[in-house]
Image (cartoon, grey):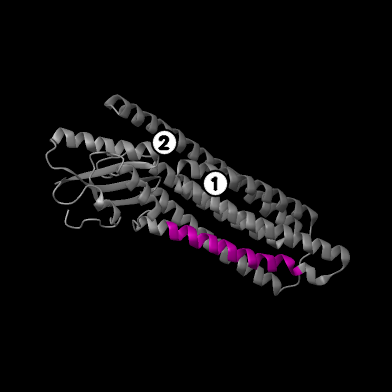
């Protein structure tokens, strides 16, 4: 692969990243506007119809507005170019935004649970068909937003957009509870079954559990990235196989990789024949970078360190089989 091909690959990758980030920011704006609209609708309809669960869901959506603003702000920061103070870029800003969203989701879940328990201890309010329609519209809208943000977030590797998608999923659960609760209350009112009027708060308690569980996993993922946890062993093995496609590489002494927000950074040490010149070593580094980055669009940077390899040290290739990703040759 010549230098012109490598330059074109770099330019094309940069354009794809910019396009993806722009689409991600647009998706978060759509989420923000949707959350603001749904918040107003739910609180207004809930107050007029006397639906406690719809008002609670509206307050939950108000928390979503704050979470979406946090995701939008973190995305803007993450998209900033590298500078003297942040030589590795601003990618982790999205991870911080994801952690903030997780915290807001947990607070919202406890609010829903508290409101549900409070509703059980009081006489059930009269159900309203308008409230049921509003909850159903919210459910359909939030389901679409979840699918949209989830697919786009996965395709562009955006942590903040994935966090927004998970927040929409939590809203889907809450809307299901609202639809089920209001629906059961309406059925109970029509059939004169008093116990069904409490289906709303019971459903709210169940949903709060799923929201907390979802927020926990999302927060854990964010903390793992902030603590620079290594990528999966399967990914490490894939990178290792690509490095070994470069003929001059005789062994892999160390291979490490970590997520950095939207992208992944690699640190690799390899052994090459000691008699090669500096220029030849430089060309090998370019080959290693090209082999990895051509197959992995999410890899932003590959740092390569070369170690001398002597033929009488060890037969070619035997070092690879016993290699360990977290420290293959500590003496190198």
| Rendered view: 62 above or below 85 | below
Q: Element at badge 1?
A: helix
Q: How far is disc 1 from disc 2 in space, using C-alphas?
A: 17 Å
Question: As rendered, which of 122 and 182 lies closer to the eye?
Answer: 182
**Magenta stretch contains residue 277:** no
Local packing at callout 1 (Cα closer than 10 Å; few below 14, some 14-19, many 20+) is many
Residue 70: image x %, image y %? 47, 50
Quarter of the image for the N terminus: give it. top left
| Rendered view: 93 above or below 279 | below
Q: How many marks?
A: 2
Q: Residue furthest bottom?
A: 121
**Magenta stretch contains residue 203:** yes
Residue 65: image x %, image y %? 55, 50
- Dominant SS type (magenta): helix
Residue 136: image x %, image y %? 72, 51
Q: Element at badge 2?
A: helix
Query: Could you tell me which residue is drawn at 52 percent across and 63 percent down?
Result: 106
Mark 1 or 2, nearer chain start: 2
Q: Please indicate whether residue 254 sits to the left or right of residue 120 in the image.
A: left
Res. 232 in view: no
Q: Which mark is residue 267?
A: none
Res. 314 in view: yes
Question: As rendered, which of 19 and 84 lies closer to the eye?
Answer: 19
Residue that label 1 marks: 150
Q: Please indicate whether residue 114 sits to the left or right of residue 4 in the image.
A: right
Q: For residue 172, what is the image quadrant? A: bottom right
Residue that label 2 marks: 17
Q: For residue 328, what is the image quadrant? A: bottom left
Q: Please indicate whether residue 105 sits to the left or right of residue 273 in the image.
A: right
Q: Which residues are magenta?
A: 198-221
């Amino acid at each position: 692969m010549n230098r012109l091909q490598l330059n074109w690959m770099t330019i094309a990758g940069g354009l794809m990243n910019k396009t993806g980030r722009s689409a991600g920011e647009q998706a978060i704006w759509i989420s923000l506007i949707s959350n603001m609209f749904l918040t107003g609708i739910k609180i207004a309809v809930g107050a007029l119809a006397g639906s406690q669960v719809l008002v609670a869901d509206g307050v939950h959506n108000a928390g979503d507005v704050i979470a979406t603003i946090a995701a939008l702000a973190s995305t803007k920061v993450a998209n900033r170019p590298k500078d003297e103070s942040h030589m590795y870029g601003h990618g982790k800003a999205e991870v911080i935004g994801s952690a903030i969203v997780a915290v807001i989701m947990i607070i919202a879940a406890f609010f829903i649970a508290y409101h549900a328990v409070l509703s059980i201890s009081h006489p059930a309010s009269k159900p309203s068909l308008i409230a049921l329609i509003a909850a159903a519209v919210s459910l359909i809208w939030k389901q679409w937003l979840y699918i949209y943000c989830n697919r786009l977030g996965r395709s562009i590797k955006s942590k903040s957009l994935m966090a927004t998608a998970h927040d929409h999923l939590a809203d889907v659960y809450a809307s299901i509870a609202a639809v089920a609760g209001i629906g059961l209350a309406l059925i109970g009112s029509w059939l004169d079954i008093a116990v069904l009027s409490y289906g709303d708060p019971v459903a709210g308690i169940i949903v709060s559990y799923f929201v907390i569980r979802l927020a926990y996993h999302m927060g854990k993922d964010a903390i793992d990235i902030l603590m620079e946890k290594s990528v999966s062993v399967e990914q490490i093995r894939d990178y290792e196989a690509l490095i070994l496609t470069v003929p001059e590489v005789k062994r892999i002494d160390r291979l490490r990789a970590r997520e950095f927000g939207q992208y992944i950074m690699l640190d690799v040490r390899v052994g090459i024949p000691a008699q090669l010149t500096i220029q030849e070593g430089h060309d090998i580094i370019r080959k290693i970078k090209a082999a990895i980055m051509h197959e992995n669009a999410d890899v932003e940077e590959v740092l390569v360190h070369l170690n001398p390899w002597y033929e009488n040290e060890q037969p070619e290739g035997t070092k690879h089989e016993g290699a360990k990703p977290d420290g293959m040759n500590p003496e190198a």
